[in-house]
Image (cartoon, rainbow, N blue to C red):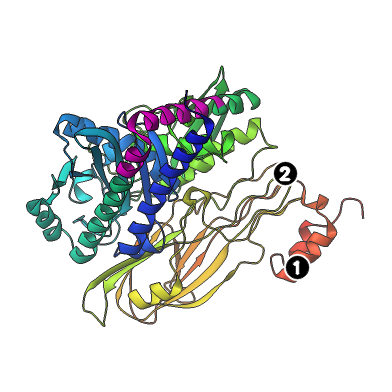
Amino acid sequence: MTDGTTVEVVRSHLVSVAEEMRATLVRTSFNPVIYEVHDFGISIYDPRLRLVAESTGLSRFLGANDYSIRKGVEYVGVENLHPGDVVLLNYPYWNAAHSYDATLFAPVFEGDVLIGFVCVRAHWMDLGAKDPGYVLDSTDMHQEGLIFPGTKVVSRGEPVREIHELIRFNSRMPNEVLGDLHAQIAALRTGERRLVELSARYGRDTVAAVIDTMIEVAEASTADALAALPQGSWTAEDWLDDDGITDDPVKMRVTVTIGDGTCVVDFAGSSPAVAGPVNLPLGATIATARVAFKAITTPAEATNAGHFTALTVRAEPGTLFHAVYPAATFTQWTGTVALELIFKALAQGMPERLAASSGGDVPGFMMVGVHPDTGRLFAVSNNEPVGWGATPRHDGIGPANHLAQTQARNTPIEVLEAKTGMFFERLEIRTDSGGAGRFRGGPGLRRDIRFVTEGEFLSVIKKTRSRPWALDGGCEPEPNQVIVFPGTDREHRVSTRRTAVSPGDRVTLLTAGGGGHGDPRDRDPQAVRDDVAEGYVSAEAARDLYERKNP
């Protein structure tokens, strides 16, 4: 029996290994979406491919790693993995993401004994898809870039030159992509060294016993948390703006059932697979459900495989939430909106535990062009903050990154202006953007962009038509908006679109606030006065929405 002190010391050591891998990746990567935004996921596994530790990153990436590493090892064959190997996987239906989210994993050996695996997933900026930057209107996988089903990029410690050259000659941004490849390899090597040191220090048998205990404890704490939740089944629906090919909205439906020590998340009733690239691979659907499940059960515990034993995720093959070859999958915003959909279902059964909807989506944008100083292609993106929903006890925060982004950050203005042809004329909190309520939703923001070079502006957002939802009589805020060429005869609103821009052209982004919670007329009058003083609420809205029922 392993004592509790040893369990906690080894568990903390495993988490520190993942964090050191994270630091290595951030310090050595070439791409701002990695070193600034933290668009990555880092995980550590035991020899049985059970998750034992992870570093902060995109939450849905971390869950996706669990799915993809199993597919990758199955494809390569564990018997074909050797010390020093590194495998690249980006086949979307196995990788649980689109083709530019490159997953690299490596087996870890102590001598000739396999003691675990390390895994790093990060977003690459170009791998030969039909369009530079981001693909918004693909209709099959083969338009979305070069595909690796599980390919060794390093074999027995030696780079596989042919694969590196294949990547180089299939990218419009080879220096950045190969730089990020090597940064991920460096992070894997860091993890390998530290895991071997850990095993040598405590012994393989002790580490294995600790991992078994960690997973057993996680299963038990999750079971206790599930038993304490309301038991029942709840269904919710929502809509994506479109699929990128037509303007038709795309239906999403989920039923969440909690009972008998299990949680089932079932996407039956959602749209069949669509022509455009919003279809979600099953692994990405599972990862999305895991984020919601962890949030309502054991949010304060460091994650391992035991936390998800009780969760089952269902989606029929060939539907929106279970893409199969050759369905297009590049625009992964479906997973972001679906996370809110799961919470919307759960809120019916446990409204006292959950917040209203956030701004409902991640309003992303990117500029692609040729930099006048370097003559080289650039493609730099940003994910805009939104307001978070109000809870039964307090106002929503905001503007903040969408809850699906976890520890991810937005791209600093200094980086965007230096590396692209964008100049930012305004960035401010939007008055009256949060949904009114006894507790109000957090505000969104406004960003005004003026272009100083030729290029393309890409807006990536899938919830501009339907409002974020409120709870218990709160108000729903206005949805996200992207306005291109404002104040001209070309002004119009878009959601996900590539727009050619020239010097002097402008774009305005208006991100949604969070939903309100409770009747606005029950709000504390002093809180309303403070909101007006801070600029969150206008005097007019304060009079119209917050007039007391019993003055």
Image position of 357 with respect to 314: above or below: below
Q: Identify the residue shown where x is 18% and y is 63%.
A: 174
Q: Amino acid at mark 1?
A: Val
Q: Quadrant of residue 61?
A: top left
Residue 532 pos. (x, y %): 75, 68
Magenta span includes 212 = yes
Q: Main secondary structure of the magenta part?
A: helix
Q: Secondary structure at mark 1?
A: helix
Residue 230 visible to an observer of this rendering: no
Q: Give the residues drawn in magenta, as a range.
A: 195-220
* Image-based side of 216 in relation to 194, left or right: right
Q: CA distance from mark 2 to mark 1?
A: 21 Å
Q: Quadrant of residue 140?
A: top left
Q: Quadrant of residue 420?
A: bottom left
Image position of 386 with respect to 346: above or below: below
* Image-based side of 2 in relation to 41, left or right: right
Residue 67 pos. (x, y %): 33, 35
Q: Identify the residue shown where x is 39% and y is 73%.
A: 415
Q: Identify the residue shown where x is 71% and y is 65%.
A: 537
Q: Amino acid at mark 2?
A: Pro
Residue 164 pos. (x, y %): 13, 55
* Image-based side of 468 in relation to 318, left or right: right
Pointer 2 local density, CA inside 10 Å: few below 14, some 14–19, many at least 20? some
Pointer 1 local density, CA inside 10 Å: few below 14, some 14–19, many at least 20? some
Which quadrant would the C terminus be assigned to in this image? bottom right
Instruction: State the residue in front, 261 or 319.
Output: 261
Q: Which mark is residue 392?
A: 2
* Of the two numbered discs 2 and 1 in the rendering, the one whose residue sits closer to the viewer: 2
